[in-house]
Image (spheres, grey):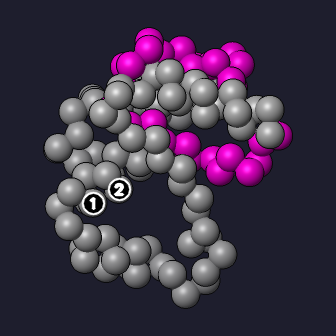
Amino acid sequence: MNPAVEHVTGVDHRNDPNVLTGERLDFAHQDDVTKVPLDDDSADTVAFRVPLHHWTKPVQEKLLAEAARIVRPSGEILLVADSWADRPGLTDNALTQQYRKLSSEDKVATLSLI
């Protein structure tokens, strides 16, 4: 994880707490995908790693409402769609080359999603 990122809390509805572990990384299990076990205004960034289009509209609305609840007023909500999996020519090496072209600020934002 990038040194500029102080702390990450991963939230997942799966039962495997070993999904996310690390020195600056915590794991919070959520029994209900629409209820995030974090306090109001407690996150600088909320990132969805599973695209919202996989959920029904009512669930999408609840997820976005939860993101709005936990993100700080100056924070960001990021929606991540891994479309690069559909591009066979985009290898890990190509992704690394693209990453190196990013500004320092964009690199921190990118790494906070990983």
Question: Which residue carries the number 2 mark?
Answer: 110
> CA–CA distance between discs 2 and 1?
6 Å
Front residue of this view, candidates 67 and 9? 67
Question: Which residue carries the number 1 mark?
Answer: 106
What's the residue type where badge 1 is placed? Asp
Label 2 with label 1: CB-CB less than 8 Å: yes
Q: Quadrant of residue 9?
A: top left
Q: Residue at image x 34%, y 35%?
A: 75
Front residue of this view, candidates 96 and 75? 75
Residue 19: in magenta span: no
* Picture coordinates of residue 87, whole percent (x, y): 61, 81
Start-end of magenta stretch: 27-56
Q: Residue at image x 35%, y 28%?
A: 73
Q: Which SS class for mark 2?
A: helix
What's the residue type where badge 2 is placed? Thr
**Dominant secondary-structure state across the stretch colored magenta:** loop
